[in-house]
Image: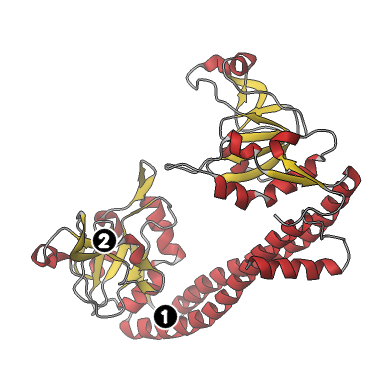
């Protein structure tokens, strides 16, 4: 952190606030659950990102509270998720307790809860950097208590909160506008496809009937450095298959021969932890060196007399096709999966090859224009995030005055943090 402003104090969080860890009663004991004692978890904080929370999805009974080491904290306490993920922050709106995935700072009278709330949000990068763990990152109570806290007198804290929230409310309004622009851009692409199809005759054709060979799965092979190359699932990108996303496999070229990819192959994700990504397709746009596709993908080869590959790439990830795929997907151990039989039954709007070519040309042109807009939107989103971090940093360096000079201070910090 920067130099402590004149008239401010600085100390470890645990030297100023009472730091409280959470706990969970035995989940299989019914008498511990369903009571009126508010109990908060990181999952609750993920679902409701409000500044002040009054409880989570489940409540504890008195017996449940007594059965574990969870402690009640008073209203105004600041709760921080310490794992899965690190850094959600909320103010307790009533007396409550938390599970072990949260750490709570109970502020003294000279620290305003809202001031501490924003201070802990600003400290998120620091908390994340000090978290440890292999399965998931977690910050311990000891390290949480070591977080540096700086503060002015209470009246100045209240003024800083007022100025900070004013700046952030305007930034949030800008972020909402950018998000709306992103949604409109996505809807525009879908509307363009519908409009093009509305002016041509087409048939709804099962995907499997528009292929030159049946759908086929790749093969799972152990990794071996220097072995015959196989694509990774991350190779499936919206712009086309990234042939550089590969690994060496423990197999020979003869073993891999049935799984070699060729230009105009269409690879489809067979499984994914997100239902929005399972079944997404990606086109092999260039002649590859000898490389195979993995068991996590399904290969499709369109029948060129019926279905052009470029047209397939345009319609496969459209909303009408996505609805079909997502309704078919089944989940096992948190992974959504689709199979060849399901994908073969997906109905595609298939006009004549001439109309496919015309639609592809028009939509490709509009998508190129949209890509330029998308880049501008992405830049605006990064800028918004950078300014948000800078505003939070400025607040706790004593640089927010509520005057026009705030903009200069924020810009300087944004450049320094870039």
Using residue 363 as the reference point, say whether residue 287 is left or right of it.
left
Compared to residue 6, the image places residue 289 above or below, namely below
Q: Indicate the quadrant where residue 224 lies.
A: bottom left
Q: Disc 1 designates what residue?
A: 200
Q: Quadrant of residue 295?
A: bottom left
User: Foreground: 132 or 191?
Assistant: 132
**Whole-percent x and y of residue 251?**
13, 60
What is the spatial separation of the Cα atoms under label 2 and label 1, in whole angstroms? Answer: 30 Å
Location of residue 68 in the rendering, given as x and y in whole percent from the top left corner: 57, 19
- Can see residue 350? no
Of callouts 2 and 1, the N-terminal one: 1
Residue under the image location 65 percent in, 63 percent down: 385
Residue denoted by label 2: 298
Q: Residue at x 36, y 51 (%)?
A: 328
Between 174 and 5, the residue placed more toward the observer is 5
Relative side of 34 to 396, left or right: left
| Residue 211 point in image, percent of width and height | 23, 70
Residue beneath the point at 69% across and 41% down: 90
Residue 411 visible (yes or no):
yes
Determine crowd level at label 2: few under 14, some 14-19, many 20+ residues with C-alpha closer than 10 A: many
Q: How is colour applied across the structure in the image?
A: secondary structure
Residue 189 position in % (x across, y down): 51, 73
> SS for tag 2?
strand
Few, some or many residues within 10 Å of mark 1 (<14, 14–19, 20+): few
The disc placed on residue 188 is: none
Q: How many marks?
A: 2
Q: In the image as oriented, which residue stretches furthest toward the left?
A: 254
Answer left or right for 26 relative to 150. left
Which residue corresponds to the image point at 30% horizontal and 78% vertical from the top-left?
A: 308
Closer to the camera, 312 or 221? 221
């Amino acid at each position: 952190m920067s130099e402590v402003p004149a008239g401010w104090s600085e100390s470890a969080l645990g030297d100023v606030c009472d730091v409280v860890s959470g706990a969970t009663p035995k989940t299989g004991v019914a008498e511990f659950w369903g009571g009126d004692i508010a109990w908060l978890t990181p999952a609750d904080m993920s679902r409701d990102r409000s500044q002040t929370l009054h409880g989570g999805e489940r409540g504890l009974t008195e017996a449940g509270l007594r059965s574990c080491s969870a402690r009640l904290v008073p209203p105004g306490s600041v709760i921080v998720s310490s794992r899965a993920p690190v850094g959600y922050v909320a103010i307790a709106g009533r007396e409550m307790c938390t599970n072990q995935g949260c750490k709570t700072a109970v502020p003294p009278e000279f620290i305003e809860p809202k001031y501490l709330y924003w201070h802990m949000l600003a400290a998120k990068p620091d908390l994340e950097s000090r978290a440890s763990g292999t399965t998931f990152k977690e910050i311990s109570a000891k390290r949480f208590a070591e977080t540096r806290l700086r503060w002015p007198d209470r009246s100045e804290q209240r003024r800083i909160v007022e100025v900070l929230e004013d700046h952030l409310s305007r930034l949030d309004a800008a972020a909402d506008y950018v998000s709306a622009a992103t949604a409109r851009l996505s809807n525009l692409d879908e509307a363009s496809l519908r409009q093009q199809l509305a002016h041509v005759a087409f048939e709804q054709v099962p995907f499997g009937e528009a292929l030159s060979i049946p759908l086929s799965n790749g093969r799972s092979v152990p990794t071996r450095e220097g072995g015959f190359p196989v694509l990774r699932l991350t190779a499936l990108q919206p712009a086309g298959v990234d042939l550089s996303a590969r690994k060496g496999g423990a197999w020979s070229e003869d073993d891999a021969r049935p799984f070699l990819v060729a230009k105009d192959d269409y690879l489809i994700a067979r499984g994914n932890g997100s239902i929005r990504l399972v079944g997404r397709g990606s086109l092999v746009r260039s002649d590859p060196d000898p490389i195979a596709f993995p068991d996590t993908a399904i290969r499709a080869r369109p029948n060129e007399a019926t279905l052009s590959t470029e047209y397939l790439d345009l319609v496969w990830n459209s909303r009408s096709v996505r609805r079909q795929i997502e309704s078919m997907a089944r989940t096992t151990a948190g992974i959504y999966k689709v199979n060849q039989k399901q994908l073969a039954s997906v109905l595609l709007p298939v006009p004549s090859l001439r109309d496919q070519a015309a639609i592809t040309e028009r939509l490709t042109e509009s998508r190129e224009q949209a890509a330029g807009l998308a880049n501008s939107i992405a830049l605006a989103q990064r800028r918004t995030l950078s300014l948000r971090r800078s505003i939070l940093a400025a607040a706790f360096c004593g640089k927010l005055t509520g005057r026009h000079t705030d903009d200069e201070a924020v810009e300087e910090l944004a450049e320094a943090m870039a």
